[in-house]
Image (cartoon, rainbow, N blue to C red):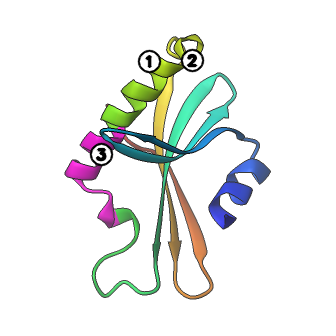
């Protein structure tokens, strides 16, 4: 997964991949220093229907927040850490990466 490798190269540590719960799925849960990062990975070959980042709308954000709560209930040691929601957007056939830190808040 190119996005995961990118984030690891940036110094983040992977805690979980494809965490699933009743509320949905989190692509990646990582650690950035003492911050827990929930990362949504989006890809679009072209922007005809919007950029990859634009697809993380209010409904998707709501589901990610609900999943993050469930994840933190499963791992209470992480629940006290700061939480951040990032979007990693891959665009075009060359899959340019745009990393949007703190893309939205819970």
Q: Residue furthest front?
A: 22
Q: CA distance from mark 3 to mark 2?
A: 20 Å
Q: Quadrant of residue 46?
A: bottom left
2 or 1: mark nearer the eye? 1
Residue 77 visible (yes or no)? yes
Q: Position of residue 72 (x, y in %)?
A: 47, 22
Q: Position of residue 88 (x, y in %)?
A: 52, 58
At mark 3, the secondary structure is: helix
| 97 relative position to 91: left or right | right
Q: Which residue is mark 2?
A: 78
Q: Position of residue 73 (x, y in %)?
A: 44, 18
Say which mark, if any, is on residue 30: none
Is 70 part of what is drawn in magenta? no
Whether 100 is drawn above or below 29: the answer is below
Q: Which residue is mark 3?
A: 61
Q: Residue at x 62, y 85 (%)?
A: 94
Q: Which quadrant, please, contains the N terminus? A: bottom right
Q: Residue furthest left?
A: 59
Label 2 CA crowd tier, 10 Å (few <14, some 14–19, many 20+): some
């Amino acid at each position: 997964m190119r996005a995961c490798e990118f984030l690891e190269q940036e110094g983040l540590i992977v805690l979980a991949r494809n965490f699933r719960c009743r509320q949905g799925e989190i692509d990646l849960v990582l650690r950035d220093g003492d911050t827990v990062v929930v990362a949504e990975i989006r890809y679009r070959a072209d922007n005809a229907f919007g950029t990859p980042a634009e697809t993380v709308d209010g409904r998707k954000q709501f589901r990610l927040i609900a999943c993050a709560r469930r994840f933190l209930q499963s791992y209470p040691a992480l629940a006290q850490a700061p939480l951040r929601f990032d979007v990693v957007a891959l665009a075009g056939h060359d899959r340019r990466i745009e990393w949007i830190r703190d893309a939205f808040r819970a």
